[in-house]
Amino acid sequence: MSQLDPTDHDVADEQTLKRIVDRNPSRLGVGRSGARPRTETLLTFLEDHGRARDAVLTTVDEQLIDDLGLVKIRSLVEDKDQYLARPDLGSDISEETATELRDRCEQNPQAQIIVSDGLSSTAVEANVPDLLRSLQDGLEERGLEVGTPVFVEFGRVDVMDAIGEELGAECCVNLIGERPGLRSAKSLSAYMVYDPKRGAPTAKKSVISNIHEGGIPPIEAGAEIADLLSEIVEKQASGLDLREDDREFQK
Amino acid sequence: MSTVDAMGSGEYKFDSIRTLLAKANERKTGDELAEIAADSAAERVAAKRAVSQLTLETLRENPVVPYDDDEVTRVIQDAVREPVYERIKDWTVADLREFLVDENTTNREIQAIRPGFTSEMIAAVTKIMSNMDLILATSKMTVTARCNNTVGTDGSLSFRLQPNDPADNVDNILDSTREGLSYGVGDAVIGINPVEDSVGTTRSILDATHDFIEEWGIPTQNCCLAHVTTQMDAIREGAPADLIFQSLAGTEAGNDEFGIDVELLDEAYDLGQRQCTASGPNIMYFETGQGAELSGDAHEGVDQLTLEARCYGLAKRYDPFLVNTVVGFIGPEYLYDGQQVIRAGIEDVFMGQLHGISMGIDACYTNHIHADQNDIENLAVLLSAAGANYFITVPMGDDVMLNYQSTSYHDAGALWEIFDLGPAPEFREWLAEMDIWRDGTLTDRAGDPTIFT
């Protein structure tokens, strides 16, 4: 967001106002026009919301999916509206899709990589190219057999349970666009699960979130995810089970 | 029990009160996700007609979750004042609607029958009321509550100042507090959602806001919205909290998901009565929201509106200073768009006030729901007309910690101006002393956070 020049309007203490505005992530020191925000403040807000909405409602570029060599499938969801209203449908795949997956992908991999548009196509486009390369390299270095990477249109986090189950994967990672905030629409999360099966509870999932240039940069995130996945395979656990295992280890 | 209703050429059968209540709701994606919504518009109306013909006695005798299975049901049923209930038990839900909108029914007549209600009765009448019915009935009710100041008095509209920070940075929280106060908001509470749910963070936020309130002599109250057990630990260690907060659900299973039960809430209330820094007597703050139970798979086959009403039935046990629904936060799988959010917001404030609790609203939305700032500004105008006790405000509507949008510090001044309202009486006097508010309006000094440095 752009900041207004604090000297733009009458304030008791301009130095202090500048300090407040500079260090605070909230939209402070914006002044007012009567009881309403100034026009420029309002337009900046609308611009940021517009960007967030576009990230939710647009789809990932087909060319990018091809270039990255991802096998493209779809969840049970038919369109964006249904995606938003029915998380259950975004978490599963049809019998036909399962058959297609088994035909086109390597079966019984140690690590299955999945990319989902989730709630931000912008996040996928901005981070996945660098992240995927770094993650694949990292997993190979650690000696893990990586399956054929898959892209799921209208995918939710738990779609990795269905895909992993169908492909017989030992563990899965789902790289998925996060719900955009006004400050950034580019944030991606990586959810991981050991022994994926439909209905696996949230508590069994590990997550690394806030992946974007301003948070964990994608190349770095790829290495972190590779580390965590190899730990998951080694300890045969993910989510809270992995943490509890850590606690025991510390005792 | 079986309820049948015929409409036109079609006939609809509802096999239980629970099913009937669900199908009589205005359309909500959450009820569809739970697979309990009406299958067609015609069935929805047939259900509304059948609900309108139920007696209050039938609703009392058929709680949506059985008495023996659920402590929220027990709290609601056991709180009914029997002689008052005896007077109204033969009313149909239609009778209740027509009583509420009658021009001869005032706050006093509503107060007279209020102790006879269960939450299911209140939910049922809501389902057969239009938006304007709800706003009209809400506008008749005055529910005041007192902590360090008084909310809900005639002519006042209060605001929570919500100065959240993504790093729990206390300096940033105080700067945002300065900005909000300079717009005249903060009389409902200066309430912070911490990122880290720890005793240490809670203490530092309570200490800082308490000291700031003391330094500037502000007639308001502070609150740190950590889990209730975290706040209780902080208070036992001596942290200065004016209010104790917790999120509520409308079933025992839902509250279990939140890590609470009635025994724990009773304990928090007792602790607050002895240890809260405020003068009181009302020292509890609750948040709710349609869909919370379903998201925790604890809805027991009950629709989200009825469950929301039951949250208020539970809240009432603790004479809260503030209760607000966080209406657009939960996501489009529960409330799909601006229309559903606005409807739910109007329903919730009506149901809360009819329970007799001091009811406000966080009119808000996330970026994956089909709603925008215009929708929540509409809702704020509608609920100011209805006489909600308070709204949430954040800097320019953007909460950079919770990553959602709510009403803005700016909206307070606009709503006061449109409806000729002002802040809570004690707070209004303080704003006048600070030269932020004069002759019923903000002064030139308003909007400048540096007046508090």
Image (tube, rainbow, N blue to C red):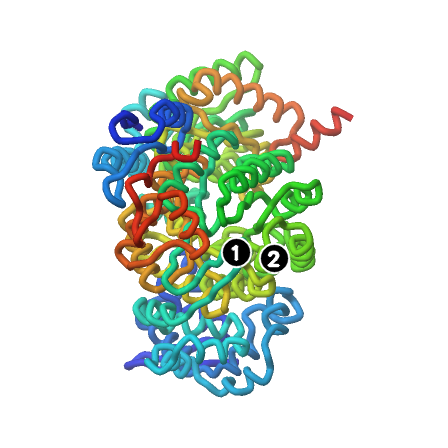
- Residue farthest to the front, as pictured: B433
Disc 1 element = helix
Disc 2 element = helix
Sequence-wise first label, 1 or 2: 2
Quadrant assignment, res A66 = top left
Report the label total.
2
Quadrant assignment, res B22 = bottom left
Quadrant assignment, res B73 = bottom right
Q: Considering depth in this image, is B329 or A67 the residue closer to the camera?
A: B329
Residue located at (46% from left, 54% from top): B426
Name the disc covering residue B349, or none: none
Q: Considering depth in this image, is B391 or B213 the residue closer to the camera?
A: B213
Q: Amino acid at mark 2?
A: Ala
Residues marked 1 and 2 touching at CB (< 8 Å): yes
Name the disc covering residue B253, or none: 2
Q: Which residue is mark 1?
A: B293
What percent of the width, then of the height, locates residue B147? 54, 56
- Residue farthest to the left, as pictured: A39
Q: Is residue A78 above or below residue B16?
A: above
The chain identifier of the residue carrying mark 2 reads B
- Residue farthest to the top, as pictured: A141
Q: Amino acid at mark 1?
A: Glu
Residue located at (48% from left, 66% from top): B306
Residue B421 appears anywhere in the view: yes
Residue A79 appears anywhere in the view: no
The chain identifier of the residue carrying mark 1 reads B
Residue located at (39% from left, 81% from top): B99
**Mark 2 neighbour class, 10 Å CA radius: few under 14, some 14 to 19, many 20 or more:** many
**Mark 1 neighbour class, 10 Å CA radius: few under 14, some 14 to 19, many 20 or more:** many
